[in-house]
Image (cartoon, rainbow, N blue to C red):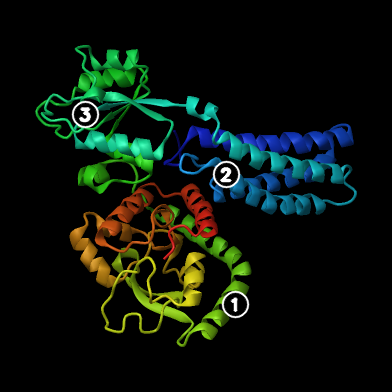
Amino acid sequence: MIRIFNHYLHRRTLMQVMFDLGLILVVVMGMSMGTLGGAGTGFVLPLLACLLLAACVFVINTATGFYEYAHNRSLLQSLARATVAILIALPLAWLIFGLLPSSVLGRDVMRLAAMGVVVWVFGHRAVVAHSKAQSLIRSRILVFGAGPSAQLVAQTLTQSDPHAEVVGFVIGPNETQAAVSSHEILKSDRPLSHLARDLRVDEIVVALTERRGGSMPLRELLDCKLSGVRVLDTSAHFEKALAQIRIDHVHAGALIFGEGFNQGWLRTAVKRVFDLVCTAILLLPGVPLMLLTALAIKLDSRGPVFYRQERTGYNGKPFEVVKFRSMRVDAEGDGQPRWAKAGDDRVTRVGRIIRKLRIDELPQLINVLRGEMSLVGPRPERPYFVDQLTQQVPFYAVRHSMKPGVTGWAQVRYHYGESVEDAKRKLEYDLYYVKNHSLFLDLVIILETIAVVLTARGSR
């Protein structure tokens, strides 16, 4: 994996993005060169059109999940996604190159080439995701430890990365009982560095249940690192593999003395400018949609169009969030706050639709303009639940060191929470965002939000 602005991306994903971008540029600009017969100023507009089309293809590929691993879907599902993507991309290619002035030579040829290459890109992306060649790109991982922590590491690797291969486990000196299968434990008297070299290990994850009393072979682990093998502890492993900070595998010292959790006035100012620019762009298509939504809510059920509720914001300061009303007016008639659940009978007919498409969140752009929220950040929670969760979940108050967001890393990675355990899992993603937030990560979250909206993933 490659770390870009503190966020890990799979090398395979970057290669796919560069391949798609390069293919569009080579094919379309190649047709342009053939038409013009040489270099000149006539290449500027076609190049800009290519870059715009490549950006659209990137967004569509991200939204349809083609840059993610395909191990959790069938080839038929991938082909269906490719069909939808092609139906969206073809009109865009036709429009983008149709906007070129008629004076640009070969405009129609480039338009046809652009339409042909987008069909090939999406079809190729769907088929290659299930090809045997993908299984050859594997990372060999040795787990130092054989207890519950080591077992959890192996489980997360299997679920999150189908190209990760756990070559085995080395039981720690102070581990008396193994949680993994005995046939997976490697028995060797050789130094750890020799074992890693013989097994062609790319990475070692130190997942010891007990680290005291000389259980860590520091010299051997250093030799492994010096020989080119990556060495990670469990906290760093979960941060890299799952993009989360596991509460049960991290301590306060690691959060204080480790990298990240940097705020500062400059980063805050840049994020504020980013929020205002993006909100202005979203409001252009958003205002007509919000007017139609308001009309539908009014016709569907009695009560106000907007739903206002106190939430906990930056530094624990309360503010009033604005959303479209998606539940009955008597949803909490007894005055007792409760979690929203799957299939909640308090949700109205229109409410089910706007929740599924996340349209009910659009009025929160008003909170962004007021400066109470950010476009991207931890989800704002109700004070009643904040008081409860702060007492029950370690480090929960850390999420309030940033402005809450309309969307966020936890929102796109985890479904709506309906229990304390769900809040704990979501906090692990929030901690990752607070630690590593950047404009790059904000853009990644916005793209994944588009995918969530299109697939109605995690809606309640």
Q: Residues within 10 Å of mark 2 (few under 14, many from 20)?
A: few
Q: Which residue is under mark 2?
A: 76
- Asked if the residue under mark 3 is in contact with the one under mark 1, i.e. CB atoms within 8 Å, the reply is no
Check the image and report above or below for 283 versus 118.
below
Instruction: Give the structural element (helix, strand or loop) at label 2.
Output: helix
Q: Amino acid at mark 1?
A: Leu
Q: Which residue is mark 3?
A: 145
* Horizontal relation, residue 127 to residue 257: left or right: right
The answer to whether residue 223 is above or below residue 121 is above
User: Where residue 121 appears, x then y in whole percent?
Assistant: 66, 39
- Between disc 2 and disc 1, whose residue precedes? 2
Give how far across and how far down residue 292 sits, in percent: 60, 77
Asked whether, in this view, residue 226 is left or right of residue 356, the answer is left
Which residue is at 24% across, 23% downward?
183
Give 152 or 314, whichever is nearer the viewer.
Answer: 152
Q: Quadrant of residue 28?
A: top right
At label 2, which amino acid type do we have?
Leu
**Comes first in the chain, label 2 or label 3:** 2
Between the C-alphas of marks 2 and 3, the distance is: 40 Å
Q: Along the polypeptide, which appears first: circle 1 or circle 3?
A: 3
Residue, disc 1 = 292
Q: Nearer the viewer, residue 160 or 373?
A: 160
